[in-house]
Amino acid sequence: MSKDESWDGTVVKKSRALLDGSNLYRRVKIRTESGETQKVRVDKALWKELEVGDRIVKEAGQDPHRA
């Protein structure tokens, strides 16, 4: 998903990993209104705030945030 896209969905899973061995990446898997699932990278503060079942929204040109 690019910066210019807008979407909203529900968090179905939270994960984090050291994919390159030195940087910790935080991701959430979301289910959009259309029923498809996507993995979205989020910052540490948002990752800590979100729980499974929370609604998340992203407007075009903005970072995702809790709804």
Image (spheres, rainbow, N blue to C red):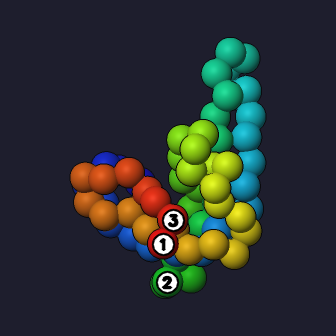
Q: Residues within 10 Å of mark 1 (few under 14, many from 20)?
A: few
| Amino acid type, label 3 | Arg
Residue drawn at the location 51% of the way across and 65% of the way down: 66
Mark 2 element type: loop
Residue found at the far bottom of this picture:
34
Residue 5 placed where, x, y %? 30, 60
> In the picture provided, is 50 more to the left or to the right than 52?
left
- Rendered position, 39 above or below 66: above
In primary-sequence order, the first of circles 1 and 2 is 2
Q: Which residue in the structure is indicated by mark 2?
A: 33
Could you tell me if the residues under marks 3 and 1 are in contact, i.e. CB atoms within 8 Å?
A: yes
Residue drawn at the location 56% of the way across and 74% of the way down: 55
Residue 59 placed where, x, y %? 31, 64
Q: Which residue in the structure is indicated by mark 1?
A: 67
Q: Nearer the viewer, mark 2 or mark 3?
A: 3
| Amino acid type, label 2 | Glu
| Amino acid type, label 1 | Ala
Q: CA distance from mark 3 to mark 1?
A: 4 Å
In primary-sequence order, the first of circles 2 and 3 is 2
